[in-house]
């Protein structure tokens, strides 16, 4: 996490001022526009950014690196936030975007005002903005490849999607769909929205699990595997193969299941 944060800040410095020479950047101000902080990954992201940014300010690399998180996850709220940051005179805006394209108008306004915009995680399509990207479609395809290896006879899949409208959710979903097309013995029979959060995912899976045909596997986006497992257990349904992310609750559950009976995922 901290490595990615350093990369993002370095991209901002290089984009705005070339090589990040201290004398050239000491008066510059960076704002971070974040659309969502409602799960543990986003909270860790913000903490990491603040740690790196605080040191950059203390070392007089930049004058400020302030964080602004939208209150309601909505595109209009984040668009208004970006417009406020333009008026406040920031030299650069880092953005984790609520939508890949719906914020493009606000971003063009920032670019026209001479502000450099760097998007990451939830990236944007506006050409004037820089993008720091992860190959999420490849990750989605790899999930299905591993599912096919663990379920050689195939079976029904439940898909747990992320935060609706974001580039991350769309990219991972695209990869998962491509993976399923390559393995016709696997079939997605239902899809719910988990917002990369175990509590939200548990409620979403619980709302459909009783009406589903037997589920062999769950493909998801991280932060939701433990919630899905809890929903299946509460409904008295057989435990499927659930793709796990790297959060503590997911890894602890996976370890417990493996010790109990050799569970693999």
Image: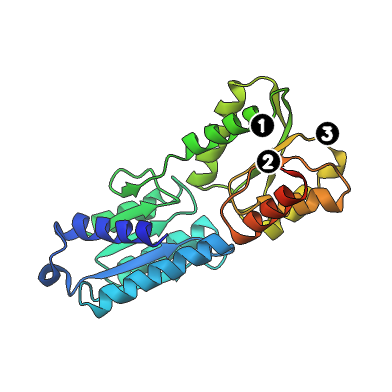
In front: 231, or 27? 231
Query: What secondary structure is marked by label 3?
Result: loop
Q: Nearer the viewer, mark 2 or mark 3?
A: 2
Quarter of the view holding residue 95: bottom left
Compare marks 1 and 2 and give the one earlier in the sequence: 1
Query: Label 3: few (<14), some or many (≥20) within 10 Å?
Result: some
Q: Residue furthest left?
A: 23
Quarter that holds the N terminus = bottom left
Question: Along the horizontal axis of the image, is 204 left or right of 182?
Answer: right
In front: 73, or 21? 21
Query: What secondary structure is marked by label 2?
Result: loop
* Real-space CA distance between mark 1 and mark 3, rounded to the nearest whole angstrom: 16 Å
At a point 33% along the width and 47% down the height, the residue shown is 131
Question: Along the horizontal axis of the image, is 58 left or right of 232?
Answer: left
What residue would you read off at disc 3? Answer: 214
Compare marks 2 and 3 and give the one earlier in the sequence: 3
At a point 70% along the width and 21% down the height, the residue shown is 185
Visible in this render: residue 242?
yes
**Residue 150: image tag:** 1
**Residue 255: image tag:** none
């Amino acid at each position: 996490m901290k490595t990615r944060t350093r990369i993002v800040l370095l991209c901002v410095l290089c984009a705005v001022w070339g090589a990040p020479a201290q004398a050239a950047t000491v008066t510059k101000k960076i704002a971070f526009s974040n659309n969502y902080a409602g799960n543990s990954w986003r909270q860790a992201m913000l903490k990491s950014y603040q740690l790196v940014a605080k040191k950059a300010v203390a070392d007089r690399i930049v004058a400020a690196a302030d964080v602004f998180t939208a209150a309601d996850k909505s595109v209009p709220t984040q668009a208004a936030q970006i417009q406020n940051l333009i008026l406040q005179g920031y030299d650069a805006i880092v953005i984790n975007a609520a939508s890949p394209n719906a914020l493009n108008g606000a971003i063009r306004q920032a670019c026209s005002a001479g502000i450099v915009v760097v998007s990451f995680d939830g990236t944007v399509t506006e050409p004037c903005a820089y993008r720091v990207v992860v190959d999420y479609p490849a990750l989605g395809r790899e999930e299905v490849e591993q599912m096919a290896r663990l379920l050689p006879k195939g079976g029904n899949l439940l898909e747990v999607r992320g935060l609706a409208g974001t580039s991350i959710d769309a990219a991972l979903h695209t990869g998962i769909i491509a993976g399923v097309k390559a393995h016709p013995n696997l079939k997605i029979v239902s899809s719910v929205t988990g917002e990369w959060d175990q509590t939200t995912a548990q409620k979403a899976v619980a709302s459909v699990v009783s009406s589903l045909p037997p589920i062999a596997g769950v493909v998801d986006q991280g932060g939701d595997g433990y919630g899905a497992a809890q929903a299946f257990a509460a409904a008295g349904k057989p435990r499927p193969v659930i793709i796990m992310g790297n959060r503590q609750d997911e890894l602890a559950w996976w370890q417990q299941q493996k010790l109990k009976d050799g569970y693999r995922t």
